[in-house]
Image: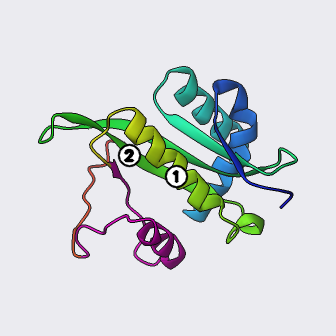
């Protein structure tokens, strides 16, 4: 890693830079590599304003990681919330403050947009991520919560 970490909000023009990170993130969850799919997906989200992506770079401009937030709402608080759906840091950059910087950018974005909270979920076995989240004040709401989905095809 060269120099300090810089985090900036990505635009659709950055899709080709974010795509390899997104593809590696999907690989972590045992999805096959598909760089064209990754680039298309990221580009569409950004072009349509369906997500906010923060990109971490080193002093030389090399991509180190990204975070992707999706908008949602809390009916109970009658306010917006942001779902931190994706967070990924390259193996070489892990432990260097990149995840912390990305999460801080997400937190600031939530505050700036008047959100009630940020939400995320992670695998129980992802101890490194859990330590990072908890060190920054994220609170696990219920260790026993079950997450349900209905597959629509």
Q: Which residue is drawn at 32% across and 42% down?
A: 152
Mark 1 lies on a secondary structure that is helix
Secondary structure under tag 2 reads strand
Q: Give the range drawn in magenta.
A: 118-143
Q: Is there any visible trace of residue 31 in the rendered image? A: no
Res 144 quadrant in image: bottom left
Query: On the picture, is 137 further left or further right than 131?
Result: left
Quadrant the N terminus occupies: bottom right
Give the distance between the C-alpha atoms of the residues marked 2 and 1, in whole angstroms: 14 Å
Is-magenta flag for residue 32? no
Instruction: Report whether residue 135 is seen.
Output: yes
Residue 143 screen position, x and y as percent: 26, 75
Residue under label 2: 83
Q: In which quarter of the image is the C terminus?
A: top left
Q: Residues within 10 Å of mark 1 (few under 14, many from 20)?
A: some
Tag of residue 104: 1
Image point (60%, 60%), residue name: 99
In the rendered structure, the answer to whether residue 124 lies left or right of residue 43 reads left
Name which residue lies at 26% across and 61% down. Answer: 147
Residue at image position (46%, 39%) is 109
Q: Which residue, as the protein is rendered here, is positioned at the far top? A: 48
Q: Is residue 86 left or right of residue 117?
A: right
Q: Where is residue 76 in the image (x, y as percent from the top left)?
A: 11, 42
Considering depth in this image, is 89 or 100 the residue closer to the camera? 100
Asked if residue 131 lies in the magenta stretch, the reply is: yes
Q: How many marks?
A: 2
Which callout, 2 or 1, points at the residue further toward the start of the chain?
2
| Mark 2 closeness class: few <14, some 14–19, many ≥20 residues within 10 Å | some
Measured from the top left, where is residue 102 in percent x and y? 58, 52
Question: Which disc is residue 57 wearing?
Answer: none
Mark closer to the observer (2, 1): 1
């Amino acid at each position: 890693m060269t120099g300090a970490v810089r985090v900036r909000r990505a635009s659709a023009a950055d899709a080709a830079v974010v795509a390899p990170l997104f593809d590696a993130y999907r690989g972590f969850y045992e999805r096959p590599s598909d760089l064209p799919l990754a680039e298309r997906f990221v580009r569409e989200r950004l072009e349509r304003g369906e997500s906010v992506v923060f990109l971490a770079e080193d002093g030389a401009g090399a991509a180190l990681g990204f975070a992707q937030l999706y908008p949602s709402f809390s009916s109970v608080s009658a306010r917006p919330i942001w779902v931190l759906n994706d967070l990924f840091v390259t193996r070489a950059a892990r432990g260097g403050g990149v995840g912390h910087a990305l999460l801080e950018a997400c937190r600031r974005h939530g505050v700036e947009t008047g959100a009630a909270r940020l939400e995320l979920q992670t695998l129980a076995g992802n101890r490194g991520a859990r330590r990072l989240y908890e060190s920054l004040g994220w609170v696990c709401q219920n260790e026993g919560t079950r997450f349900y989905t209905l597959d629509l095809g």
